[in-house]
Image: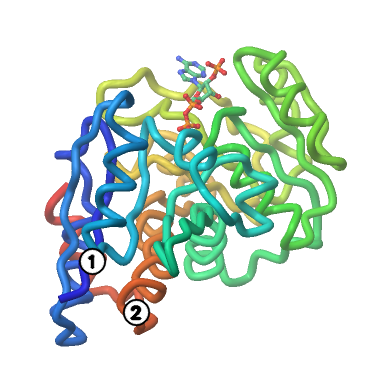
């Protein structure tokens, strides 16, 4: 049996076991995918124990993505640039690390906003944490000419901008002034998620052709998306990113590239 899993702390909220379990069943693969709760001080040794125990690899989630990055023997180019990994593959006594969040973000955007063309214009990205770093990489890699980056803590946005040409920082309070001049708006913060304050971003100047996307998926329709849709824009929720980021790991461990279907999405939606 091929074994894999997801490591986080806490982890019981993770939908990854349900996603991978769905694909294992769909493809009739003799495999397992479990949720593994590891506190930071146990992380490194426990990953090595999983490798010694014959695991094919694992996903990594909060708060271990940087620790996992430091532990890898080999890194993909995108993981090196992003500085964090969410997918480990154990192969020939080595640990290979990749960051598939960026691929998941783009695949979701392409699926739900197929008319969006990266090259047409700038994007406004809110937030400058780990998720923002992966998304900025994905957007520039796909051809977005310029990113306006706004973060509550400006210094953190400036640190991110220093690593990427074409990223320009604006004050958090000034983000609304960029709304009318961008083709894509991305919320990478947790604002708008259940239990968090709402994201306050006036969308009065939003053009209907501008796509608005949120990495939050609980609730599926955040206030940001609701307002954008009411103004005629396409709103892309964060659930698809979660589903699509899982594809490369499943393929690496279980040998089959799975597909994100409506049936899978409905199943995960029902479990939220
Ligand atoms: P992740 O890996 O999910 O990006 P993170 O690295 O902790 O998590 O980053 C969280 C992001 O949400 C940051 O951009 C953070 O802004 P700060 O850098 O100023 O902390 C943003 N964020 C969290 N709570 C926020 C709030 N109440 N208002 C504005 N931004 C917030």
Residue 219 appearing in the image: no
Q: Which residue is drawn at 52% across and 66% down?
A: 107
- Residue 68 locus on image (x, y percent): 45, 41
Q: Residue 20 carries which label?
A: 1
C-alpha span from label 2 to label 1 = 9 Å
Does dot 2 land on a helix, a strand or a loop? Answer: loop
Front one among 62 and 214:
62
Left or right of 233 on screen, residue 12: left
Q: In this view, does 145 lie above or below 45?
A: below
- Residue 265 locus on image (x, y percent): 26, 65
- Residue 76 locus on image (x, y percent): 62, 59
Q: Which residue is drawn at 26% across and 48% down?
A: 49
Front one among 170 and 3:
3
Residue 268 appearing in the image: yes
Left or right of 5 on screen, residue 69: right
Front one among 88 and 154:
88
Q: Residue 86 carries which label?
A: none
Residues at circles 2 and 1 in contact by the CB criterion of under 8 Å: no
- Residue 268 locus on image (x, y percent): 20, 58
Left or right of 15 on screen, residue 110: right
| Residue position for label 2 | 258
Q: Residue at x 53, y 56 (%)?
A: 98
């Amino acid at each position: 049996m091929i074994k894999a899993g997801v490591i986080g702390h806490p982890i019981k909220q993770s939908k990854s076991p349900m996603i991978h379990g769905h694909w294992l069943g769909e493809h009739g693969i003799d495999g397992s995918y479990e949720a593994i709760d590891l506190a930071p001080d146990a992380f490194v040794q426990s990953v090595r124990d999983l490798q010694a125990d014959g695991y094919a690899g694992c996903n990594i989630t909060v708060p271990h993505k940087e620790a996992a990055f430091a532990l890898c023997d080999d890194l993909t180019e995108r993981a090196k640039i992003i500085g964090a990994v969410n997918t480990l593959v154990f192969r020939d006594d080595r640990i290979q690390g990749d960051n598939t969040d960026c691929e998941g973000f783009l695949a979701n955007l392409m699926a739900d906003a197929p008319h969006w063309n990266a090259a047409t214009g700038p994007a406004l990205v809110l937030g400058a944490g780990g998720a923002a770093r992966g998304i900025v990489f994905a957007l520039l890699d796909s051809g977005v000419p310029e990113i306006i980056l706004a973060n509550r803590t400006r210094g953190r946005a400036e640190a991110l901008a220093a690593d990427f040409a074409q990223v320009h920082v604006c004050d958090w309070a000034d983000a609304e002034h960029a709304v009318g001049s961008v083709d894509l708006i991305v919320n990478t913060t947790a604002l708008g998620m259940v239990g968090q304050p709402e994201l306050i971003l006036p969308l009065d100047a939003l053009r209907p052709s501008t796509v608005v996307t949120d990495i939050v998926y609980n609730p599926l329709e955040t206030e940001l998306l609701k307002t954008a849709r009411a103004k005629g824009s396409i709103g892309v929720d964060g659930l698809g990113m979660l589903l699509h980021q899982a594809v490369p790991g499943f393929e690496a461990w279980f040998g089959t590239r799975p597909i994100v279907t409506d049936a899978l999405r409905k199943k995960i939606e029902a479990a939220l």
